[in-house]
Image: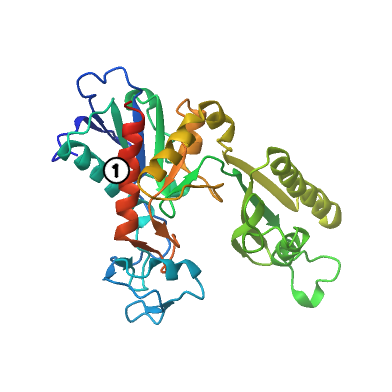
Amino acid sequence: MEELVVSNIQLTDNCFLYGKLPATKGYENAPAIGFIAHMDTVADYCEQPIRPIITEHYDGKELALGNSGLILSPEMFPHLESLKGHTLITTDGNTLLGADDKAGIAEILTMVEHLQAESIPHGPICIAFTPDEEIGTGASHFDVELFGADFAYTVDGGAEGEIEYENFNACEAVFEVRGVNVHPGSAKGIMINAAAVACEIQMMLPQEETPEQTEGYEGFYHLIRLNGSCEKAELVYIVRDHDADKFEQKKQKLKEIVTAMNHKYGEDTVRLQIREQYRNMAEKIRPCFHLIENAKKACEQVGVVPKVQPIRGGTDGARLSFMGLPCPNLGTGGYAFHGPYEHITAEGMDKSTAILVELVKQYSR
């Protein structure tokens, strides 16, 4: 940002980085548009340095990921055939790539380069790079007033041309199970095996409502951690649904399980804590639907078919939208985030950057 002579650069104590591009002469009254990406990656597959592999003129077929034994295959990822001839950037199979969301940072800064090199007139532009998006707190200390934008986009999605303004309603649910541990030889009528109760809780949830069984607008219960012994156990879930009523029904189902378990095994055997995480930003974006229409136009201007689709996850933009900054999400050109199969193409990143430049033009007319 300093090399690009971005103004008003501020790095806060909470590691939020802000900057501005003042409006060019005559465009001071255009809306102030913001672009946001996050620096952090998920903790999984980060035990060693990332060693990206660049494959030029990719043939669209199976590709060995270094010496890891993993194969990036069209059988697993059918879209790979459409990337034939592109410059493919992958991992070596031992780490994730980090395109989620360092690709977004690169694209925003490259957008700034284009605006300056091509002397493209524009209104006020606000830039922010955030920490902690992957643990759901990336917007917790975001200073909307300091940022200064009227509207914004997070650049944190998948394939180029993706436009997302509907995300899950989300919470974390933690079951704590307290068992009664005695010698198994004399346990009849006394022992309560907390680990077994935990397994029972899992089986009481709708088995078809899991991430691997759902798509589109369908919600789920996702068991992300299970640990325990005869004495005590813990199950940690994330619960998701686009529909607010169905989301409330899912939370009610969890509470009913607690009631049933405590009726069966004794009061206070099972406790439940539910922590709200974020809400569906659609209700905040719909009154500002120009954000979606202009994003679609920007895609079309650079020859990319816009793909308006729901997010099967969350984004900083969801929190920001409820903090007074309407903020849908745009694709970066990446695929298979959060694991060793993560990949992106140079061409996809170029197209994503071109979309950002066109968006700036849309809001400067």
Instruction: Give the residue displayed 77% in from the left and 64% down from the top.
Output: 192
Q: At label 1, which amino acid type do we have?
A: Ile
For the residue labelled by badge 1, is the local secondary structure a helix, a strand or a loop?
helix
**In the depicted structure, whether residue 50 falls above or below residue 216:** below
**In the depicted structure, whether residue 278 falls above or below residue 21:** below
Residue nearest the observer in this picture, 52 or 134: 52
Task: Give residue 26's quadrant in the image.
Answer: top left
Instruction: Give the residue displayed 56% in from the left and 43% down from the top.
Output: 167
Task: Give residue 81's quadrant in the image.
Answer: bottom left
Task: Assess disc 1: are there few (<14), some (14-19) or many (≥20) residues with their C-alpha within 10 Å of its C-alpha.
Answer: many
> Left or right of 203: which side holds 42?
left
- Is residue 66 visible to the viewer in this orientation of the structure? yes
> Left or right of 317: which side holds 19?
left
Q: Position of residue 145 (x, y in %)?
A: 37, 22
> Left or right of 271: which side holds 30?
left
Q: Position of residue 349 (x, y in %)?
A: 32, 54
Q: Position of residue 201 (x, y in %)?
A: 74, 59
- Quarter holding the N terminus is top left
Task: Give the number of callouts.
Answer: 1
- Is residue 129 visible to the viewer in this orientation of the structure? no
Q: Position of residue 278 (x, y in %)?
A: 55, 39
**In the depicted structure, whether residue 97 falls above or below residue 183:** above
Q: How is the image coloured?
A: rainbow
Residue nearest the observer in this picture, 25 or 303: 303
- Quarter holding the C terminus is top left
Residue nearest the observer in this picture, 186 or 339: 339
* Residue position for label 1: 108
